[in-house]
Image (cartoon, helix red, strand yellow):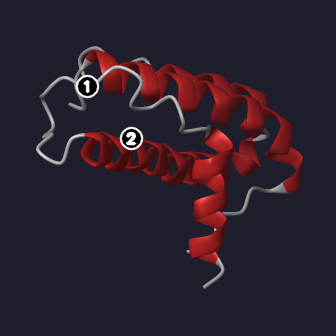
Amino acid sequence: MKMQVVKNVLFPFRKAANEMFEQTKKEFLQENGVLNGDTTKRSDVYTNMYRKVQKNDRLAAGYTMQQYERAYRQAFISAAKAADPGWEIGKPVSSGTLDGITRESVEANLKKSGSS
C-alpha cells in the first residue's frame, strides 16, 4: 500500500511523524515492546496533529500516521530480534539496539513496499 500525505497537511504531519517516532521508540524501550494502552502518550501525538490540520484532511492524516506508527513498531521489533534472536515481547531490549533506526529509514522502506 502506498503511503501518501495530502500536500496541505505535510508540515504538521512531518512534525507529528517525528514526535510519533520518538514516542513509539521511548515506549517500546520502557515497556519492553509491550503495547500498553494505560501508559502511552502516542494518542497525544494524534490529538496535536488533528488540531493542526484542516478538518477535511484529518482522516487521511490519521490513517497515514497509523501506518507509520505500525511501521516504526515493526522496525523496532525486527531490530530487537536481530540483536537477540531469542528476544520476545516483554523481555528487556538490549542497550543500543534501536540506535541505528531512524524515522527516515523506516519511511523509506514504506515507500519502497508501497510502490511494488
Q: Quadrant of the N terminus?
A: bottom right
Label 2: how many Cα within 10 Å (few below 14, some 14–19, many 20+) = many
| Residue at screen point 28% across, 25% down | 94
Q: Which residue is mark 2?
A: 76
From the viewer's perspective, is the residue at label 1 or at label 2 nearer? 2
Query: x, y percentage for residue 100?
Result: 54, 36
| Residue at screen point 25% across, 25% down | 37
Say what amino acid the circle numbered 1 marks: Gly
Q: Is residue 21 left or right of residue 34?
A: right
Residue 55 quadrant: top right
Residue 109 quadrant: bottom right
Q: Is residue 77 left or right of residue 98?
A: left
| Residue at screen point 44% across, 29% down | 24
Say what amino acid the circle numbered 2 marks: Phe
| Residue at screen point 26% across, 26% down | 93
Q: Is residue 33 left or right of residue 23?
A: left
Query: x, y percentage for residue 95?
Result: 34, 19
Residue 65 quadrant: top right
Using the rendered image of the protein, determine whether residue 42 is visible from the camera's viewpoint. Answer: no
Query: x, y percentage for residue 86?
Result: 11, 44
| Label 1: which secondary element | loop
Q: Which residue is mark 1?
A: 37
- Tag 1 near tag 2, CB within 8 Å: no
Q: CA distance from mark 1 to mark 2?
A: 18 Å
